[in-house]
Image (spheres, grey):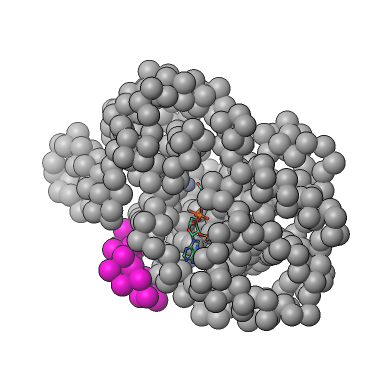
Amino acid sequence: MIGNFTYNTPTKLYFGKDAVKDLPAVVGKYGRNVLMTYGGGSIKKIGLYDRVKDLLKDFHIVELSGIEPNPKYDPSVLEGARLCKENDIDVILSVGGGSVLDCSKAISVCAKYDGEGWDLISGKVKATAAVPIVDIITLAATGSEYDMGCVISNTAINDKRGYLDELMYPVASFLDPEYTYSVNKWQTACGTADAINHVLEQFFASPHSMFNDGVMISALRSLMTNVKIALEDPNDYAARSELMYVCSWGCNGILANGAGYSGWPMHSIEHALSAYFDITHGAGLAIITPRWMQEILSEKTVERFVTLGTQLFGFDKNLPDSEIAQKVIDGFYAFFESIGIPMHLGELGVKAEAIDEMADHILENDNTNEPWMYAPIGKDALVRILTASM
Ligand code: NZQ
Ligand code: ZN
């Protein structure tokens, strides 16, 4: 069944080799004063920094560099908002991965707000305006280039918040798969694990439809196949282009139009892990995924596992449902392991002593136990999932 829905992604995509040639025309629509944001230097190594500066030589560019993975409210968002205000910035140009773009999205609303920016990010106050954002995304992972979300860490209070507002859709996103050739094996694997998880968060929901299932299974098949090719040959354009495009569909709702909403419980768990231990988002998700699946496997959910087992993994439909479900769980575990993700949180520096506090934090900030959720999980279940993931 396709239920009621409203859908709109207003972001214009420019996809393919040398798509950035259109950058001056696109940025110029919004003004001449540009805040260019980027991370720790990968864009310089791949020549993209010079290319952008050359393309935008007639613009006034203010730079904010050094944006961290798991971007921080303080200093990055605060510093960016200050630069926007002081320089009367017309448009933000984000050049980098999801962290740079998420930070830029938060900057875009904080720059138009006179109070404490965290009040916007934590949902206390609704933003009323934002500086337009154009981005060049250099890592296939989050889908931030095609959605209205950002995820910001506030280290002072051990919080990592997902924040959504339609004001934060980029006005244009440039996706050139060639700029992802330099993404190392770890980030390639973790980025793909993130996107796989985005699909699964939407697949495990009710109601759902043959159409949604088909699109999602196709997305999973493409991600799981192409990541192996890209790990083997980082410069394989066909593989990098599929990864980039499929990842973009991750979080803007298109995969689940008309379907139920799960509440994205694995993301709630992972955001706590990143907040406490600053781990790589996709790695945390990959480790949690099979443990979460094990926890929520039930008479109600087994049908989802059977659909994945028969349509994605090609398991024999005559096997008992419970056996197919177990093979799916084991299948995802083996897949993530095969792309180089250590499958234990302890290997990423997570400490078992923090599990109890993290479980409370998840319930308080991101309640995973709402009755409307597809598979609500309370404190005991959270503790079991985290403990099994160690
Ligand atoms: O900082 P630089 O030097 O640019 O290096 C980055 C960084 O070290 C590097 N990198 C990026 N592009 C590269 C490259 N290295 C070589 N070649 C390139 N072309 O990769 C490292 C990781 O970058 P990051 O931006 O942190 O990765 P990702 O894109 O996976 O973003 C992760 C963040 O996004 C959030 C996550 O929680 C995490 O904070 N998420 C955002 C979402 C959204 N906005 O919709 C949804 C997701 O679920 C996720 O929560
Ligand atoms: Zn994610």
Q: Is residue 323 visible?
A: yes
Viewer-closest of 150 and 1: 150
Q: Magenta part of the protein: which range?
A: 222-239
Q: Position of residue 150 (x, y in %)?
A: 61, 47
Q: Position of residue 206 (x, y in %)?
A: 43, 37
Magenta portion: prevailing SS class? helix
Viewer-closest of 244 and 81: 81
Query: In what quadrant of the picture does the N terminus appear?
Result: top left
Where residue 200 sits, quadrant-wise, is top left
- Position of residue 31 relative to residue 202, above or below, is below
Name the residue at 56% across, 37% down: 160
Name the residue at 85% across, 41% down: 114
| Residue 56 magenta | no
374 vs 338, left or right, is right
190 vs 94, left or right, is left
Where residue 387 sits, quadrant-wise, is top left
| Residue 227 magenta | yes
Name the residue at 55% across, 76% down: 47
Viewer-closest of 322 and 379: 379
Query: In what quadrant of the picture does the C terminus appear?
Result: top left
Q: Is residue 293 visible?
A: no
Q: Position of residue 103 (x, y in %)?
A: 64, 51
Q: Position of residue 118 (x, y in %)?
A: 71, 36
- Position of residue 132 relative to residue 70, above or below, is below
- Position of residue 180 relative to residue 6, above or below, is below
Q: How many marks?
A: 0
Where residue 24 sits, quadrant-wise, is bottom right
Name the residue at 52% across, 65% down: 42
67 vs 63, left or right, is left
